[in-house]
Image (cartoon, rainbow, N blue to C red):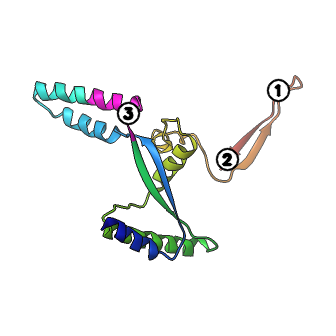
Amino acid sequence: MVENALMAACQGMDFPVQFLCTTEVVDTRVAIAELYSHIVKETSDVRRSYAEVLLSYLDTLMSQRSVLVRRSYVVVGCDGEPYEKARGILEHRAASLTGAMSRSKVTAVALSSDEIVDLLHHLLNRNSAVRPSDLVNAGALDLCVSGKGVLVGVQEGGKTGSAAGAVLAG
């Protein structure tokens, strides 16, 4: 039944798609955060000690990289259109693909920009446990300045080879 519904969904698409499958280390960060939030409210010592053991197990499970999860993605594209029109076309295609997948009892969710960046980072850096979205949330881009700067003044050093410095305002 599911195979027939998936075949019908694929035959109903009139645009190119690319299927991408990848294996990733199981991500227990959400479960750990949820367990931490519940452990502070817990009054029973037995349940609290069990939660601590479970937290340790979940952390070890993710850090040892021994359990892998297979994830499948569908990449939908649109070429040769202006940005505004391409965005609408992509949203329509994603909605029709999501509807076709739901009829075949397969859950499909459009990725956010952060999730796309994390996926690309994972594909290009297989052995890295770092996620760009976590770095941004931790403040990695706080020191970056964007926009046009205006050269306010240049300070030159003496004759002894010191470098010139420029001050930007903007």
Q: Residue at x 20, y 37 (%)?
A: 38
Single out the mark in the foreground, 1 or 2. Answer: 1
Label 2 neighbourhood size at 10 Å, few (<14), some (14-19), many (20+)?
few
Disc number at residue 169? 2
Q: Earlier in the sequence, mark 2 or mark 3?
A: 3
Q: Is-magenta flag for residue 40? A: no
When the figure is inspected, residue 66 is found, relative to residue 109, above or below; the finding is above
Which residue in the protein does label 1 denote?
Answer: 162
Among all residues in the image, which is located at the extreme right?
159
User: Tag 1: residue type?
Assistant: Ser
Q: CA distance from mark 2 to mark 3?
A: 45 Å
Q: Earlier in the sequence, mark 1 or mark 2?
A: 1
Q: Residue at x 39, y 32 (%)?
A: 66
User: Tag 3: residue type?
Assistant: Met
As rendered, which of 59 and 18 lies closer to the eye? 18
Disc number at residue 30? none
Q: CA distance from mark 1 to mark 2?
A: 23 Å
Which residue in the protein does label 3 denote?
Answer: 62
Q: Residue at x 46, y 57 (%)?
A: 73
As rendered, which of 55 and 164 lies closer to the eye? 55
Left of 105 or right of it: where is 160?
right
Part of the protein shown in magenta: 55-68
User: Tag 2: residue type?
Assistant: Ala
Single out the mark in the foreground, 3 or 1. Answer: 3
Left of 24 or right of it: where is 32?
left
